[in-house]
Each structure stands twice: as C-alpha cells, then as structure tokens.
Amino acid sequence: MDWLQDFATWAWDRHHNPLSWYIRPMFIIPFCYFAYRRSLGGVLLTIFGLLTSMFWFPKPDAPDAQVVEFLRMEKEYLLGPWPWWKILISATIPAWFFWLALALWTRSFISGAAAITAAMAGKLAWSFYFGNESAWTLVPPSVIGLLICYGALYALYRYSLRTS
C-alpha cells in the first residue's frame, strides 16, 4: 500500500499548482455539451477528466502561501472524522452533477445556469466557512470559470435554437 500513499502525495503536491484550479471549472463545458448531446459516455469521460485534472500540472517550485493554507485545511477536512453532516455535504456533489446533466439533457438552460451558479456559490461558501481567509485564493478561478461557463452555456443555447 506504500505505492498508494506515494501516489496520493505525488498528486497532492501537483494540486498546489494554480493551473489545476483554473482548469477544473472548464470541465463543466464539455460536461454540459455531452449532457446536451445525451452522451452518457461523454459525461462519464468528462467526470474522469475532472477527477484526474488536479495532478495534470507539475508541482510548483514555490506554492502560494494561501494555497498551501487552504489545501492544508482541505486535507484535514477530508482525512478527519466523517459525521453525518459531512456525508450530507459530500452527497451534494453527485446530486449537483445529476442536476446539471438532467438540466442539459432536457434542454433546460435556465436550470443549467442555476446549477452552475449554485455549484460556485456552494464551493465558495464551504471554502470560506472552513478555510477562512485562505479561501480568497479560490475566488479568481471560480469567478473566471463561472463567466466562461455562462458564455459556453449561452453559445450552446444559441446553437440549440439554430438546430431545432
């Protein structure tokens, strides 16, 4: 089992790279596209990409102090005890993916935009609640990701108008 611990350490070190924080919200775009196209395989492939994207980038030479502090809190949160409320909070993640997929599968762009907004707001609320000031490091990638996702969702909406 040492290889698993070694892999987790290797991946966690790469998660300190800010590029992984900026790229992860971009996975919402292909997720929405594949849900719109009703491609379960594409949806699942996108989720796999999202889950692995935290370690696609090299370990930073000198990670930002706020990033280090935030990820320290996140690691303590994940490795600490798991009471019912933590399980409930974690269950919102697959529920959110289901909501977003269902919204686009059924062509409800308003519901899709609401799901994307709820995800960003929920992630930031969780981050500030548990990470305090260190959560400010998530604001730029979250807001930029939200705006890009809105643009992509709008483009998909316009595309759907032309093809229907």
Image (tube, rainbow, N blue to C red):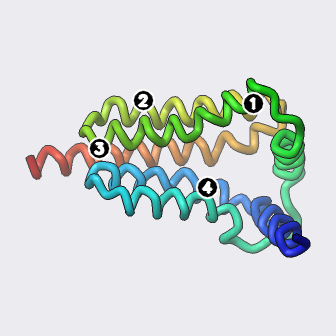
Mark 3 and mark 2 in contact (Cβ < 8 Å)? no
Q: Quadrant of residue 18?
A: bottom right
Considering only order in the chain, which callout, 4 or 3, is on the residue closer to the N terminus? 4
Disc 2 versus disc 3: distance between alpha carbons? 15 Å
87 horizontally vs 70: left or right? left
Q: Picture coordinates of residue 9 (x, y %)?
A: 86, 66
Residue situated in front as seen by the camera: 88 or 110: 88
Disc 1 versus disc 3: distance between alpha carbons? 29 Å
The amino acid on which the numbered mark 4 sits, given as a three-letter code, is Tyr
Q: Helix, strand or loop at disc 1?
A: helix
| Residue 114: mark | 2
The amino acid on which the numbered mark 1 sits, given as a three-letter code, is Lys
Q: Residue at x 81, y 71 (%)?
A: 7
Mark 1 and mark 2 in contact (Cβ < 8 Å)? no
Residue at numbered disc 3: 105
Disc 3 versus disc 4: distance between alpha carbons? 26 Å
